[in-house]
Amino acid sequence: MVDTMTTQFIGPHPWPVIGKKLYARGPRVAAIAFLGADGPDLLRHLRDGDTLVVNASKEAVASHSTSPHAIETLIGRGVEVLSSPKLHAKVMVTAEMAVIGSANASAHSAQSLEAVVVTDDPAMVENARDFVIDVAADANTIDDELLAELHQVWIDHPRAPVPGVNGGSAEWGLLPDHVAGVLLVPVVADDLAESEREAMAGEVEQTPEYPIFGFQLGDDSDGYQVDAVLLRYEDGYIHEPTVVFGDVRRPIPGRADGAYQLLRHKHRQRGRRASRVASELSAGVVEEFDAALAADDDVMLSDELAEQVLRVWGLVVGERD
């Protein structure tokens, strides 16, 4: 990239460049149709005094194309966030630069093949800013009342994949559409070297919000079904929920033997003491939970117990296979 160029075409993964451009002098105005769960990170340079217009129609939120959680985060930073239900454009403008192209502010967009034009041509920057200001003038302010409604819409509607918008699972959350069971799994200490862990993680494209890591399997294990949720526990502690990302792989990188599977988890999500989890369960499932902990073996949780345990981490199961 040559900074002295007036106009540049950037693709197929323009978000690193977009992030650098948004760091430039503000104020910033942007009209980006769909704001995913990772939007606040991609738009981390938006701050107090900046304006963002998104499509936060109930249809967009019901499909989980626009996240009310992301909207709330940006509003908390002081960004003015408005909604235009007809918006489909993706335009970002600083004091001296405009970014115009196909990229939504979402994890799916960050992984997709996108293209943008970045320009510091004064006429184009002015036209782009005028466009966003005009869109904002006809948009609806997202106040506390509307935000509460959008949160409820998000909860009430299972995520429906929209091609090109929210097709990636990282866009809407950790859990897949169909969960292949929720298992309590005792942890057995592995003997993986750091280089082996890095090799496992490097086998797939990583998403910052939902990293993938390798989980060593015991010699007598057949592995776990893809899209199963594993709640790994040891010494009275339950680690953060993980989702099985792929089939059993052999051998362990750098070895002649060994087996492992890849697991997904949510960045910065932490484990809980088993006693704390138990305190948040209803009386009807505590006995089952205690028995699962005492089994010292993999235990498939009932639908009711699985639902209550996952809610401790704010996770909601859509469907069970």
Image (tube, helix red, strand yellow):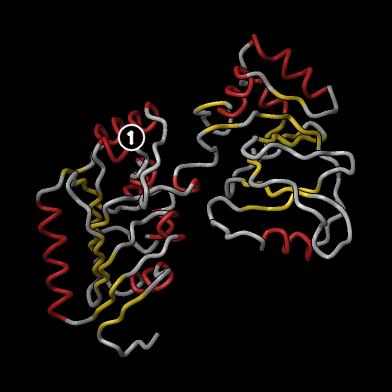
Q: Is residue 17 left or right of residue 94?
A: right
Amino acid type for the residue under numbered disc 1 = Ala
| Up/down of 56 relative to 276, above or below | below
Q: Residues within 10 Å of mark 1 (few under 14, many from 20)?
A: many
Q: Residue at x 82, y 34 (%)?
A: 235
When asked about the image quadrant of residue 295, the answer is top right
State the residue position of label 1.
62
Q: 315 or 47: nearer the eye?
A: 315
Where's residue 128, x and y in %? 16, 68
Q: Is residue 90 left or right of residue 279?
A: left
In the rendered image, which quarter contains the N terminus?
bottom left
Q: 240 or 226: nearer the eye?
A: 226
Q: Residue at x 11, y 65 (%)?
A: 130
| Up/down of 307 relative to 260, above or below | above
Q: Residue at x 78, y 49 (%)?
A: 260
Where's residue 317, x and y in %? 53, 28
Where's residue 63, x and y in %? 35, 38
Q: Is residue 123 left or right of residue 75?
A: left
Where's residue 67, x and y in %? 36, 43
When asked about the image quadrant of residue 242, the answer is top right
Q: 17 or 69: nearer the eye?
A: 17
Q: Is residue 19 left or right of residue 217?
A: left
